[in-house]
Amino acid sequence: MDLFPLWLSLRVALSATALTLAVGIPVALLLARVRFAGRGLLEAVVVLPLVLPPTVLGYYLLVVIGSRGPLGRALAAVGLELAFTWWAAVLAASIGSVALLIKSAQAGFETVDRQLEQAARTLGRSEWSVFWSVTLPLAWRAVLAGAVLAFCRALGEFGITLMVAGNIPGRTQTLPLAIYDRVQAAQMDEAHALALIAVGIVVVLVFGLSRVARLRY
């Protein structure tokens, strides 16, 4: 059995989760702490990937990163290509999963006692230091939950990935795409084995998350 799709999916999911953390935590903190014009619109944009058909998201992403798109042309000018590479799969997985991280982290940041943060500021801590020493340690369970859910969602991403990265064996074929291929080819034993691997990974992660959630501070 070819395990390349498994290793590629794990690499894509890990990379996508790192990207969603880098982008999602600042957005979650902004939504949790700041009231501004357009906040409702930003929240709507955040949840769009959860409700729009993946093919629609994939189409518009391909319009942006394809050879005729603005980002695609800019990258081509420096000799780089994004569409139909595994990096396109990372971008697709990030877009599909970032809302899970943002909403979970936002809920966690909203529960942090602001007086504790203010106390740290009166002791001379910078905003950066307050975030790392007070805010994040108090909201880490919610952030971790969002990261695990985002990883699981990225691991199972199918529609957006198919549109922007394609289904190229040995290059961009992730685990969900490989399962689809095996079913189409009536290779049900391999499809079953790959599906069990995917289910096993998600079950272990969700079970581990539930155990962590029961830990006391």
Image (cartoon, grey):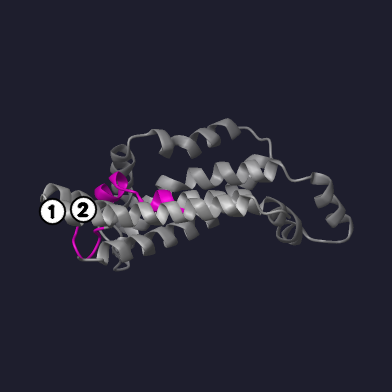
Question: At 50% from the left edge and 33% from the top edge, which residue is drawn?
Answer: 44
Residue flagged by tag 1: what amino acid is it?
A: Gln
Magenta-drawn stretch contains 152 = yes
Q: Is residue 75 above or below residue 42?
A: below
Classify mark 2: residues with Cα within 10 Å, few (<14), some (14-19) or many (20+): many
Q: Which residues are magenta?
A: 151-173
Whether 137 is among the magenta residues is: no
Disc 2 designates what residue? 191
How far from the left and from the top, in percent, is residue 193? 25, 56
Asked if disc 1 and disc 2 are in contact, CB closer than 8 Å, the reply is yes
Residue where numbered disc 1 is placed: 187
Q: Spatial distance from mark 1 to mark 2, Cα to Cα?
A: 6 Å
Q: Position of residue 19 (x, y in %)?
A: 48, 58
Circle 1 Cα neighbour tier, 10 Å, few/some/many (<14 / 14–19 / ≥20)? few
Which quadrant, please, contains the N terminus? bottom left
Q: Secondary structure at mark 2?
A: helix
Residue 24 visible to the viewer: no
Nearest the camera: 16 or 111?
111
The residue positioned 80% from the left and 51% from the top of the image is: 117
145 left or right, relative to 139:
left
